[in-house]
Image (tube, helix red, strand yellow):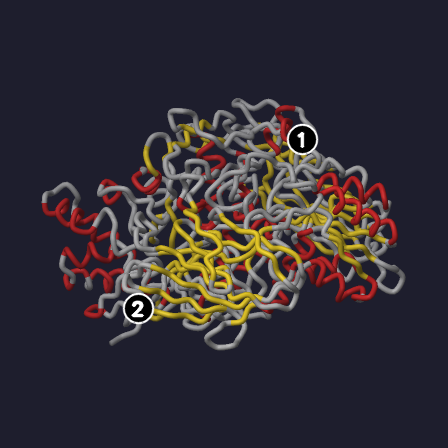
């Protein structure tokens, strides 16, 4: 059999070969291919040489088919950290690295990138998406997609479209006028489809202007008809509600094997309600995807073996530092390890860092380097003290592996047994974590009545602990053979992701003695599980924070800071604040962290604050500290990357991709909650993010594009074309700048357009281009940029060009734009 390349989907021979497979399939078989086989795979069809296609969550890490700590994944920095690099090359490398991870795990399709916009800073999934600006988002998303697919794995830009918040996400109707829909929310997706030729796009849960995303005409126009998308529209999990979605350009329903299509869709085709030609088009797209990833016999995959490989751990460290934003430095940084004395490291997140946000993007890394680990390694453990300062954790945290012993094997960990109604074991696992999720895999959740988790836990300190479980349903906790607690743990919210991935907890206080093991047995009743996740289960066995006096913790931390040469305070969020499934209600840091920073800054003027949050938080102490670094969710190498920055081994390379407010009340666009009619109205139109701040004339704490390095720069000039340009062309710009400092560094050139006499409403200014640059001390650079004139157009029943003069301003943030040139656009 001749083997044909699937690299170019426009290849007529490939289309003909795929078309020839259709007559071999019955209608029932065609329809079967349009719904997944299970949580993560599609149906194989041996008679046409089709194997299953395996998809995996993976915007910033590829988990694989099972949620299992025994099959660890690289935990890359969050999307907000990647976007803060303003560097498409980093995004491309992240894509390529994700594909390497995918192939290692047998994964064909990565469900990412997440490229919804940061419309409101309260968005709970903010950390998983790139930016508040569509152009920056589009550039990074296109680069990520190119990197993934060059290595032979499908990328899936998501969630199409206007899925920019989590509140009532299954039912919310986003009411968006055509112009902002085109100029903002669709523009963020366009480049990944048109230029990087994404092989899939994921349709969202929400409705747009009255029609659910999976049934919306937007799946055809602009996605297919204007952008030339020839890939698979895969649904978000459970997003397809009815056969009506089959009439739209929705191709694949996930998960399976159940769903709204199946027999109902077969009947709809036979009755003439749905055209079989529509079914054939969907099947052909799935077969084409299979050909691309190597899942269809007779077709050569785009890349059978990844061609771009690098040290993934080293890349994670580099990317974390490149995306760290320094928003203040009074000269305390960088620190010389040979000259600095003692360092007081303070903060719950310094020891228990958040390296990723909560939800379906979660991966399980083999090892995490915390800020405390990284600082001790860089400056010497003997020179570093640690104080908790403030408790950030809410709910139970998993038990440390080193303190657990599996009673069945004697190895670190615990034993899990699935039992039937008579108490017989159906399935057992020896696990190395007490935070467990079954979401796919072989565990017989539907067939079991009870799940039993058993370990021997050895406390390190004498006193009392709050031992318990985080899950949904009835749980019984036995300690040393005695039932000490029984609870029916109920869901607080309506979102299945919230109840599944961030479940509530119930605990009991028990006395413990250091070094004396406790036999801990937890039983979960699984006999009455229903709903779309009845074959999935999550549970964490662990401890809640003790009742410690917050004032005492703050005093202890301030005293430690006073006695040290430098204080490094790590503040941040927790899994109850930033996660899939719910939005934030406040931008304030949880707990007593603000009071902690005030106290430490008063005790030591050389206080450095590291913000370990995926999205903006209010920093009322920002003027009191010597330096502030925004480290986001820095991935598994977060601590080492932070140490690299603190020591000056590398510089913080980030610039803000989203505005950080000084107060929550000053944010121009904040609302994420639908009205009583279920509609979330995007009344701000084209003015989100920095555009809204400029329109309101308000001043944030730190503006879009802002960030500092360890050197200084001058923007010397920007030169545009002398002659008018024509719509459809690009505007050539030459930007000159100089590193005026004494060390090498990075800068991000940013170009914004302004149109004072526009025929239509415009933002005060809007981003049209950017480029990261590097230079040695005293070095002068001249950088050429091409600005597409499409970014000067506006949408009214099509793209329209307003002729006349445009001011193109260049600089280092949305308000720091010292040079400009005037460009004339022809009618």
Residue 1 in sight from this viewpoint: yes
Residue 670 position, x and y percent, is 55, 30
How many numbered marks, from 0 up? Answer: 2
Residue 378 position, x and y percent, is 77, 65
Residue 436 position, x and y percent, is 46, 60
Between 565 and 632, the one lying in front of the other is 565
Lateral position of residue 475 relative to residue 807, left or right: left
Between 410 and 231, the one lying in front of the other is 410
* Disc 1 to disc 2, C-alpha distance: 58 Å
Please state which of the two labelled residues, at mark 1 or mark 2, is closer to the viewer.
2
Question: What residue is drawn where x is 72% and y is 39%?
Answer: 594
Q: Residues within 10 Å of mark 2 (few under 14, many from 20)?
A: few
Q: Quadrant of residue 796?
A: top left
Q: Is residue 756 above or below residue 60?
A: above
Residue 324 position, x and y percent, is 68, 52
Question: What residue is drawn where x is 72% and y is 56%?
Answer: 774
* Residue of label 2: 424
Between 420 and 141, the one lying in front of the other is 420
Label 1 secondary element: loop
Q: Quadrant of residue 476?
A: bottom left
Lateral position of residue 65 relative to residue 283, left or right: right
Label 2 secondary element: loop
The image quadrant where one finds the N terminus is bottom left
Q: Which mark is residue 41?
A: none
Query: Could you tell which of marks 1 and 2 lies nearer the N-terminus?
Result: 2
Q: Which mark is residue 663?
A: 1
Q: Is residue 675 above or below residue 5?
A: above
Residue 287 in sight from this viewpoint: no
Q: Quadrant of residue 586?
A: top right
């Amino acid at each position: 059999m001749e083997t044909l390349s699937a690299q170019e989907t426009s290849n007529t021979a490939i289309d003909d070969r795929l078309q020839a497979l259709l007559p071999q399939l019955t209608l029932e078989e065609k329809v079967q291919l349009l719904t997944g086989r299970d949580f993560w795979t599609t149906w194989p069809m041996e008679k046409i040489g089709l194997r299953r296609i395996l998809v995996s969550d993976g915007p910033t890490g590829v988990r694989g088919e099972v949620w299992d700590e025994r099959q660890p994944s690289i935990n890359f920095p969050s999307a907000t950290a990647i976007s803060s690099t303003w560097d498409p090359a980093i995004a491309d490398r992240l894509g390529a690295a994700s594909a390497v991870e995918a192939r290692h795990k047998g994964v064909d399709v990565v469900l990412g990138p997440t490229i919804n916009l940061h419309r409101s800073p309260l968005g709970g999934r903010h950390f998983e998406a790139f930016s508040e600006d569509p152009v920056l988002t589009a550039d990074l998303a296109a680069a990520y997609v190119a990197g993934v697919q060059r290595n032979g794995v499908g990328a899936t830009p998501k969630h199409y479209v206007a899925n920019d918040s989590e509140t009532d996400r299954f039912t919310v109707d986003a009411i968006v006028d055509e112009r902002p829909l085109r100029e903002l929310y669709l523009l963020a997706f366009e480049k990944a489809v048109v230029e990087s030729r994404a092989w899939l796009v994921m349709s969202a849960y929400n409705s747009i202007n009255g029609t659910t995303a999976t049934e919306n005409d937007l799946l055809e126009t602009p996605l297919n008809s204007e952008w030339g998308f020839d890939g698979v529209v895969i649904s978000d999990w459970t997003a397809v509600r009815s056969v009506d979605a089959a009439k739209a350009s929705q191709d694949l329903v996930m998960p399976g094997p159940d769903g709204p299509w199946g027999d109902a869709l077969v009947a709809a085709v036979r009755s003439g309600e749905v055209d079989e030609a529509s079914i054939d088009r969907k099947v052909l797209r799935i077969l084409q995807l299979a050909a691309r990833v190597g899942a269809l016999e007779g077709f050569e995959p785009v890349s059978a073996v990844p061609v771009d490989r690098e040290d993934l751990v080293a890349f994670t460290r580099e990317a974390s530092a490149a995306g760290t934003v320094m928003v203040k430095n009074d000269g305390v940084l960088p620190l010389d390890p040979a000259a600095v004395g003692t360092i007081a490291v303070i903060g719950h997140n310094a020891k228990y860092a958040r390296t990723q946000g909560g939800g379906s993007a979660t991966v399980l890394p083999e090892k995490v380097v915390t800020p405390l680990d990284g600082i001790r390694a860089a400056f010497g453990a003997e020179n570093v003290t640690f104080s908790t300062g403030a408790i950030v954790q809410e709910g139970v945290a998993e038990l440390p592996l080193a303190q657990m012993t599996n009673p069945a094997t004697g190895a670190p960990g615990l034993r899990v047994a699935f039992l039937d109604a008579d108490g017989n074991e159906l399935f057992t696992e020896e696990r190395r974590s007490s935070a467990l999720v079954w979401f796919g895999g072989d565990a017989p959740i539907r067939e079991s009545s009870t799940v039993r988790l058993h370990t021997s836990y050895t406390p390190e300190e004498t006193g009392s602990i709050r031992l318990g479980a985080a899950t949904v349903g009835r749980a019984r906790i036995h300690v040393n053979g005695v039932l000490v607690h029984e609870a029916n743990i109920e869901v607080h919210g309506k979102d299945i992701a919230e109840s599944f991935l961030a479940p509530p907890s119930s605990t009991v206080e028990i006395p413990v003695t250091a070094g004396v093991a406790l036999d801990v047995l937890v039983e979960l009743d699984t006999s009455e599980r229903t709903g779309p996740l009845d074959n999935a289960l999550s549970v964490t066995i662990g401890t809640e924070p003790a009742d410690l006096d917050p004032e005492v913790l703050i005093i202890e931390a301030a005293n430690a800071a006073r006695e040290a040469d430098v204080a490094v305070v790590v503040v941040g969020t927790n899994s109850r604040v930033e996660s899939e499934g719910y939005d934030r209600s406040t931008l304030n840091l949880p707990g007593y962290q603000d009071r902690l920073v005030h106290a430490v800054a008063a005790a030591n003027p050389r206080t450095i604050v590291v913000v370990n949050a995926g999205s903006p938080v209010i920093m009322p102490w920002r003027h009191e500290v010597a330096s502030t670094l925004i480290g986001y969710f820095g991935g598994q190498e977060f601590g080492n990357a932070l140490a690299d920055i603190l020591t000056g081994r590398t510089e913080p390379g980030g610039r803000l991709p989203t505005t950080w407010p000084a107060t929550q009340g000053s944010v121009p666009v904040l609302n994420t909650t639908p009205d009583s009619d279920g509609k979330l109205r995007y009344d701000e139109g084209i003015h989100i993010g920095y555009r809204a701040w400029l329109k309101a004339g308000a001043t944030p704490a730190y503006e879009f594009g802002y960030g500092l390095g360890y050197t200084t720069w001058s923007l010397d000039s920007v030169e545009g074309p002398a002659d008018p340009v024509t719509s459809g062309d690009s505007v050539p710009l030459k930007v000159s700048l100089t590193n005026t400092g004494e060390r090498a560094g990075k800068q991000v050139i940013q170009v914004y357009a302004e149109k004072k006499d526009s025929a239509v409403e415009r933002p005060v200014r809007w981003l049209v281009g950017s480029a990261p640059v590097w230079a040695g001390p005293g070095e002068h650079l001249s950088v050429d940029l091409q600005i597409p004139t499409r970014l000067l157009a506006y949408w009214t029943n099509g793209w329209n060009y307003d002729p006349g003069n445009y001011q193109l301003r260049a600089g280092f943030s949305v308000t720091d734009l010292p040079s400009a040139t005037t460009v004339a656009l022809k009618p």
